[in-house]
Image (tube, coloured by chain):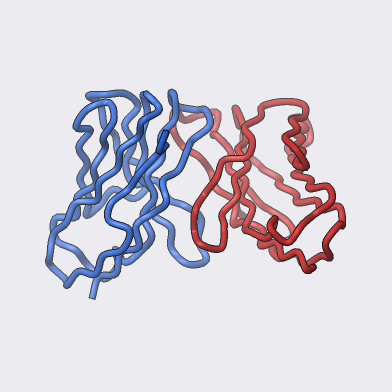
Chain colours: A red, B blue
Amino acid sequence: KNEVEQSPQNLTAQEGEFITINCSYSVGISALHWLQQHPGGGIVSLFMLSSGKKKHGRLIATINIQEKHSSLHITASHPRDSAVYICAAYSAGSNYQLIWGAGTKLIIKP
Amino acid sequence: NAGVTQTPKFQVLKTGQSMTLQCAQDMNHNSMYWYRQDPGMGLRLIYYSASEGTTDKGEVPNGYNVSRLNKREFSLRLESAAPSQTSVYFCASSERIRITQYFGPGTRLTVL
């Protein structure tokens, strides 16, 4: 069992839909990182959070430390949101180690 | 600001050849990282440098060496390339360890 698991693996939705991507982890963490990888391969950091909720534009990330779960939400989705979304957790026992989820491939159809 | 830059973008090597991947950041970050990404797998850390003058092994350091040339630059060297090193290599930096990392555009390396 992976220490960081994402669901779903693949998600196809229509433009305008509300999107939720989930990330569950089984180890102690100090913070969780959400990233976006574009079809061209570039990786962009979206959020880093250790508690509560963060919002940037149409993106919202939440984390529940007790339940070991984080979600990434996209409101009013658009085809340009099509990408792979990755969660990665900073292991509480390591100075540097990010434990990576496998990613969720999101396709938004116009 | 250019952020994190990597050169080259693409490279094809023959088995046994050597090369150096270059990475530079202009954000005055202390920490820098080298990752590889293989199809169907998450990123794996090769080496990292928590601060100028220090380097440490990550998960998959075998076959690689690094140099933290100065605060801005962190290079990755393959001394004798092997087909198993065919991958996309990403450099990243952060203000310090354990916070948001910023990624370069990647280098696609093929070893024949």
Q: Quadrant of the C terminus of chain A?
A: bottom right
Q: Is A64 left, or right, of B79 in this rendering?
A: right
The answer to which of B64 and A57 lies nearer the viewer is A57
Q: Quadrant of the N terminus of chain A?
A: bottom right
Q: Residue furthest front?
A: B1
Q: Is residue A77 above or below residue B28?
A: below
Q: Is A70 left, or right, of B100 in this rendering?
A: right
Q: Is residue A79 above or below residue A59?
A: below
> Which residue sits at x=31%, y=31%?
B49
The answer to which of A41 and A64 lies nearer the viewer is A41
Q: Residue furthest right?
A: A17
Q: Position of residue B40 (x, y in %)?
A: 52, 66
> Which residue sits at x=71%, y=45%?
A24
Q: Is residue A14 above or below residue B19?
A: below
Q: Position of residue B14 (x, y in %)?
A: 17, 72
Q: Is A74 left, or right, of B35 in this rendering?
A: right
Q: Residue B26's quadrant in the figure?
A: top left
Q: Residue furthest bottom?
A: B112
Q: Is residue B18 above or below residue A29?
A: below
> Which residue sits at x=78%, y=36%?
A67
Q: Position of residue A99 (x, y in %)?
A: 53, 43
> Which residue sits at x=46%, y=30%?
A94
Q: Count the numbered circles shown.
A: 0
The answer to which of B25 and A67 lies nearer the viewer is B25
